[in-house]
Amino acid sequence: MICQNDATGSDEGGSSGSFRPVLHTFLCAGSVLAHRYVSCVNGAQKVRARAGRCGSLLSSPPVLRRVSDPPSSAHVSVRWKCPCTPDVDQLFGAYGASPGPGPGPGPGRSTARPPAKLPEDEPDADGYESDDCTALGTLDFSLLYDQENNALHCTISKAKGLKPMDHNGLADPYVKLHLLPGASKANKLRTKTLRNTLNPTWNETLTYYGITDEDMIRKTLRISVCDEDKFRHNEFIGETRVPLKKLKPNHTKTFSICLEKQLPVDKTEDKSLEERGRILISLKYSSQKQGLLVGIVRCAHLAAMDANGYSDPYVKTYLKPDVDKKSKHKTAVKKKTLNPEFNEEFCYEIKHGDLAKKTLEITVWDYDIGKSNDFIGGVVLGINAKGERLKHWFDCLKNKDKRIERWHTLTNELPGAVLSD
Ligand SMILES: [Ca+2]
Ligand SMILES: [Ca+2]
Ligand SMILES: [Ca+2]
């Protein structure tokens, strides 16, 4: 059967037939997801063809926009509703963690215009409930999720009345942050140490980059205060935990809490997939180049794979299935860093209609001299992926010639991947 997608053809010409190969493929595979995808794309194509001078509106369907985004001039008063939106919502709603807008409320979703008078610095009502309050001390901090830049800013202000940990009746406190669940090394940030005090003032902001809306629903920030010791192990003083779903996007929340004893690690934590850091990937299907442009922008908080506490990261990409073994691309190696910037882009020449069947596999490695390189982590984008990974792939397929950049979590395992360098 030959159903070639006419790559150079205009949108008007036979748009209803242009996706038949994809439809055929997926119907054969019995994939409901794919069927929805195809009907969605077809629908969007038809509308685009009919749209005439409204084309600019349609080139960025609102399904891609966060509701909290400030309206651009093209979106001032018209909220164009893609006929496929219900399908898209249904598709992604199944994964429960879609950051995209849609009907109905959902966790991590903000309103288009937040109420004008939200209290900016409302102390956490849950504070001061613990019996350990007087024993371990209190901690003041504030958290801000910057949704647009995928950053979680944690400002550690001060502690008061910390438990004495040293012979001189004082302590040398610092604050440690962990994102749970996650690999400890890749997720750990800390303040400086302040010497000989039980009432330290840090006023230090620690930032996690590459935080997604999915993280904000799923993750908990663990904040612990420790005493630094020169000649023995540092000692734990107390901690607190903040489920990130308690935070509203783009809204600073101030906490004043009593430190608690070390809380047992949640047994329900999924240990099978360990987090190894974050990667910022851009995708664009270029109709001019007839190919998928994969941008490896940068990584953040990578796991350390060398004895010096760093890695020498580089990134490899494959577009699978890779029958000709020609799909491998590699970035340059960045020496001794856990936050490398790559800014490299690879082009996979492929017809748009064939792309839906493919899977993009991205792995991050630590380059080592004299032995085989260490696998740091990876991520797979495709129609069989879930959550943000599926949504990114889907948005790329649906929006030709639009560069879409998203953060993804790297994990220590890839489904079905053969990990060899
Ligand atoms: Ca000490
Ligand atoms: Ca190594
Ligand atoms: Ca190395």
Image (tube, rainbow, N blue to C red):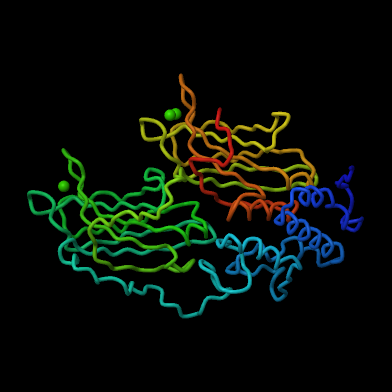
- Is residue 369 shown above or below 403? above
* Residue located farthest toward the top when viewing the structure as drawn: 370
* Residue located farthest toward the right when viewing the structure as drawn: 13
In which quadrant is the N terminus drawn? top right
Query: Horizontal and vertical percent for residue 330?
Result: 61, 32
Count of residue discs: 0
In which quadrant is the C terminus drawn? top right
Query: Horizontal and vertical percent for residue 396?
Result: 69, 52
- Is residue 23 shown above or below 119? above
Q: Is residue 132 left or right of residue 146?
A: left
Q: Is residue 237 left or right of residue 13?
A: left
Q: Residue at x 74, y 45 (%)?
A: 355
Taking the image in four quarters, ligand 2 sits in the one at: top left
Query: Horizontal and vertical percent for residue 26?
Result: 76, 50
* Residue located farthest toward the left when viewing the structure as drawn: 168
The picture quadrant where one finds residue 222 is: bottom left
Q: Give whichever of 25, 368 is nearer the camera.
A: 25
- Is residue 368 shown above or below 350? above
Q: Give whichever of 377, 206 is nearer the camera.
A: 377
Q: Is residue 199 left or right of residue 316?
A: left
Query: Horizontal and vertical percent for residue 142?
Result: 36, 64
Q: Residue at x 66, y 67 (%)?
A: 72
The picture quadrant where one finds residue 360 is: top right
